Image (cartoon, rainbow, N blue to C red):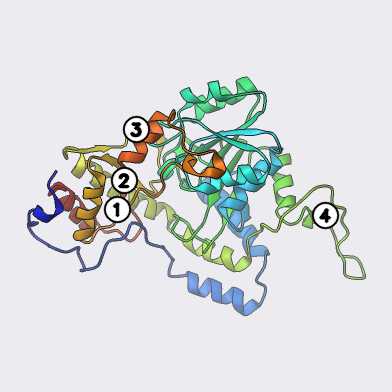
Amino acid sequence: MADISSLPALTGNQVPPGGQFLPLFNTFVHPSAQQRVSEVLASTFLSEGKLVKQFEGQLTAELGMLHPAALNSGTSALHLALEVAGVGAGDEVILSPQTFIASAITVVQVGARPVFADIQYENGNIDPADVEHRITPRTKAIMAVHWGGYPCDMAELHAIAQRHNLVVIEDAAHAPGATYQGQPIGAISDYTCFSFQAIKHLTTGDGGALCARDPEKAREVFRRRWFGIDRANSPMNEVGEREYDLTDVGYKYHLSDYAAALGLANLNGFHDRMAVRRQRVQQYRDGLAAVAGLTLFQHQTDRESAHWLFGFHVENRLDFIRALKARGVGASVVHDGIDNNTLFGGKRPELTQQRRFDETQIHIPLHDALTAEQAGYIVDVIKQGW
């Protein structure tokens, strides 16, 4: 590919439509959010209340989530899932290193050890073929991270888990609205963890949700998200104290009503925005399919990605990033393999596909504010070479 100093001039626009730099992410806030949040502030009831419950109901109705408990972050969801699943000191959890550190740091927080399996180079997800031989008598769970919103091979992972009596936890921080074999993510595994952080598909400012398939485990999630106190069955006595008896450790992980108000507003039109996002993805896939030095991630027809990221593999990646930046377009790896952290044991050269992925993966802008014209400009920029 050409050095950036000798890049050919683009035909047509020399700068992005609108003249502004095109970032990788953009935070979507629905026009109704200001009114909804203002009403909560005016009420002065700011903590967990009826809006949190309403938001949870809408997560089920709109996105098919089972027993979603709204929490203050996706990291809290991961930690609480591990706790309720009984993962603790001396246990092991098998997961992909292609993720953010939150996935593994919560494993360490409960006293367990993250064990990294290799990934599928074609999409960045954990490779089921590399999981089973990593199982030991200490293995308690498999954590499946849906990289970029594209669902992992859940049938294969569930089969492994059933053979070895393991818990399956989905890190679906990128995947609200995704489906696998006709089922919504959030209704498939023992536990599914979502993030509603600022740049995710659905934001509450910061927040998350934890879904537990088993109703009994779901009740435990709801109880332990607020110190371990069962609010529904701990009435206030005459002297103004709740009547309860703690039996295990709980946390202050609940979502607030003012955050839920933002979430409820942003659920409006979610599926319409997802449909537009899919159009942008198809525009990218069609426009970039034959570009030399670029290989699109593979997608299977039995699942629908939530398309939080649009990624692919590229040759001469640093030149690619610089060429796009020079023409007003952001590009990023988002995350490299987290096994390079000393806390998690250091980089593992035997994870050969992860190491390949670290060298060539890249992502370009994909968000609710991205227009067809802007996506077309990005395609044209890439076609000019790097």
- In this rendering, the answer to whether 54 lies above or below 83 is below
Q: CA distance from mark 1 to mark 4?
A: 50 Å
**Residue at mark 2 to residue at mark 4: CA–CA distance:** 50 Å
Mark 3 or mark 2, earlier in chain = 3
Q: Secondary structure at mark 4?
A: helix
* Marks 2,4: beta carbons within 8 A: no
Residue drawn at point x = 86 percent, y = 62 percent: 242
Give the residue displayed 50% in from the left and 44% down from the top: 341
Tell me the residue that label 3 is attached to.
122
Looking at marks 3 and 4 on the same chain, the residue that comes earlier in the sequence is marked by 3
State the separation of the CA atoms marked 3 and 1: 19 Å
**Disc 2 or 4, which lies upstream in sequence?**
4
Which percent across, then down, holds residue 148? Answer: 41, 44
The residue carrying mark 4 is 233
Among numbered discs 3 and 1, the one appearing first in the sequence: 3
Q: Residues within 10 Å of mark 1 (few under 14, many from 20)?
A: many
The residue under label 2 is which amino acid type? Ile
Residue type at mark 3: give it: Glu
Q: Which residue is mark 2?
A: 362
**Residue that badge 1 annotates:** 331
